[in-house]
Amino acid sequence: MKNLVIVESPAKAKTISKFLGSEYKVMASMGHVRDLPKSKLGFDPADNFKPQYLISTDKRKVIADLKKEITKDTTIYLAADEDREGEAIAWHLIPALKVEKNPLKRIVFHEITKGAILKALENPREVNQNLVDAQQARRILDRAVGYELSPLLWKKVRYGLSAGRVQSVAVRIIVDRENEIRAFIPEEFWKIKADFINPQLNTELAKIDGKVKKIKNEQEAKVIEASINQGEFELFDIDESESKRNPAAPFTTSTLQQEASRKLGYSVKQTMVIAQQLYEGNIQNIPNHTGGLITYMRTDSLNLSTVATSAAKEVIEKTYGAEYSLKSPRVYKSKAKGAQEAHEAIRPVDLSLKPSMIKAYVDNAQFRLYSLIWKRTLATQMQTAKIANTTYKISAGKDKEYEFQVKGQRIIFPGFMKVYTEGSDNPESALDSSEKILPSIKVGTKLDLEKLDLEQNFTKPPARYTEASLVKKLESEGIGRPSTYAPTISTIQAREYITKSEDKKLIPTPTGEIVNSFLTDHFPNILDLGFTAKVEEEFDDIADGKIAWQQVMKDFYGDFKKTIDEKEESVNKEDYLQIREIGTDPKSGKPVSARVGRFGPFVQIGTKDDEEKPLFVAIPAHLNMDTITMDEAMFLFTLPRVVGQTADGEDIKANIGRFGPYLQVKTKYYSLKEDDPYKIELPRALELIKQIDEEKAKATIKNFEKEKIQVLDGRYGPYIKQGRKNYKIPKGKDAASLELEDCLSIIENDSKTSKRAPAKKTAAAKTTTKTATKKAPAKKAPVKKTTTKKTTAKKEK
């Protein structure tokens, strides 16, 4: 192939290939093709932090397929995204493909349209080493934090935990907010509302003796009520004014994530997945349109091109009239800390393509997000809205010392509001774009009271973060960049340091809180918002060519590694164990406590110092370690319970084990995925046992019962199972023809290979809480109050 264009994703390759002739081949690298090794630090601090990059195992076939299309004369167009990650992907492809001597051209574009692609091909550049170095600095510094901190967490807190530079700061923000909520003491205050008839008005006490004052208790409210009952109500002033409202700026990554959360209910990750689809344009053929529907979706720029503002003006005048358009484009300036990446804001590639015109060709999620982007972009180039505001002021009380107010508004000219108004994280303070017309009344009018309400209220604690408000916080603090918000929030939830409430609020889990306590106690700079923002600024300086990435690593790594070594010796594990005493077991007189162990929260009767081993059982997901009662805890110990008998008279027992709830018949186990082991009855148990037995029979290719070896057909093809261990069947071996000797040989060879592997445990550890273990956990000491949820943790790789 004469010309090979390498993009990041197959969807993008498919779209771009439509624009190029047969002399071009477009293929995908599937993202990064090289990375630091998973099993070791991956860089040498003694050799100027020289990284050791390897072709990722899952990218070897990708590299092989790309190489097949390359000869010494092939011109290679590196067409990864124009940001630091994209630049690094392009840079890594060169040594991975060994094409240093080939003609190499770096091309970039912000939208996937024929014009943009052809223009990019005509204007190639070289790989920007400064952008590559900024990405290298981030990757290596993050590896240093994850690789060095995670093993320390394993030793001092619990096996399987992990830390990450940006993720741990995000967890801290959420934990700090939770601590604010716990420490919050509600203050009482009262509202006094007066409703009138003829005409109807609903008013509220606004001032006392001309000043805004808080009514602290019922006694004060009653004094006001008594005075009001001795006087009359009179409209003494009408305050009229005109205000203007300007549209919100065009979308950046952050604001798109926030608004899609508020208005569409999308998670941050979901928003980015849908935006990627709209950007790549790999959807049904839309009449008169080929390619992507929106510009690049990872940006913190507020710029709109002249092409975009001209198109917006044309659409506005054609759809809404000339009075809604601007004489000259409205320009926005970014307020985000460290805003960078020279893209446009997120906008439709063709504003004349209205949402209604694509609805039949995209799915509902794509349609809704495109509509949001289209409306917001159009609104940015529309006239200011004009609002007439009216406030009625009503005197009351024996000496007219009280002032009630009611506010109304009338839209004089809707301007951009004809198309779009921005949402809010706080419904009470959300922009009210609807009209509220007050009845026509003259000053001096006496009003007839219908009812007077004295309403007790209490101040509320600060609200928990949502995904949207957390993104806003991270951006305002200069933590992370457009490409990091979604993966950061996804990671802390996947590790189960954070969980979501039913109303989509972010709540720290006990594991998240204990990890945060450990890190804030011993590595305060890692969790310091200012420090994290400073590191981001240093990455920006590297990207601008102002400093070398190795210098950033030198400034950070020495002191960090020294602290790690010191904490290995000085930190006491007993300080970071989670225990809550619940009561005393009435039968044994032993203490009953709620704890968090390797596999999550559980209840324990007794301690490890007792002659008999302690009894313990997992705390189910619907109960909370901090709030579980003695009765609830003791009920958990009713397992195992005999549900009934099989047709052969064998007991069917329901229980919870390490891997979750299950049924047991002699030595056979049946996982309970949906059913409650405390409540399941015999008919349902028999139904499940029959169903699972039939599924296992279908999946069983060979069964050597005596040796407890089976050849099974699984989700990813045939494999060998012995006890709880699975073994891969080598290529070329027919699973159906395997005999016992073949299976034993495969198992033995696998064991030998495992023994030759490095002994040091550095790979990711994953623990999934389902239940209590069969061995008593170590004795633990109380720690800060936390909430409980399942924990899944991975070491940063």
Image (cartoon, helix red, strand yellow):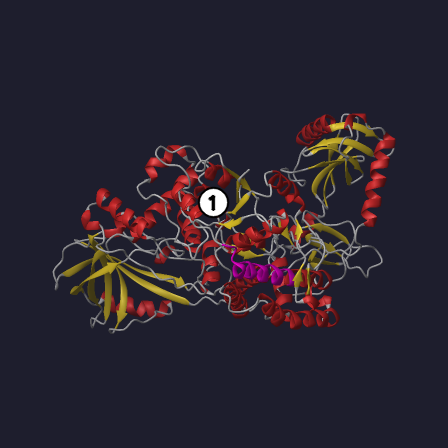
Quarter location, residue 343: bottom left
Screen quadrant of the C terminus: bottom right
Percent coordinates x, y for residue 159 in the rendering = 72, 57
- 310 lies left or right of 605: left
**Which residues are drawn in magenta?**
126-144
The answer to if 185 sits in the magenta stretch is: no
SS at badge 1:
helix
Dominant SS in magenta: helix
The answer to if 128 sits in the magenta stretch is: yes
- 87 lies left or right of 776: left
Number of marks in picture = 1
Screen quadrant of the N terminus: top right
Depth check: 725 or 775 in front?
725
Depth check: 616 or 274 in front?
274
Q: Is residue 580 visible?
A: no
Q: Residues within 10 Å of mark 1 (few under 14, many from 20)?
A: many
Looking at the rendered structure, the kind of residue marked 1 is Gln
Percent coordinates x, y for residue 44 in the rendering = 69, 64
Percent coordinates x, y for residue 319 in the rendering = 23, 42
Depth check: 732 or 670 in front?
732
Quarter location, residue 112: top left
Percent coordinates x, y for residue 709 in the rendering = 82, 34
**Residue depicted at 42% across the width and 64% down the height:** 459
Q: Is residue 639 above or below residue 42?
A: above
Q: Report which residue position mark 1 lands on.
A: 276
Q: Is residue 137 visible?
A: yes
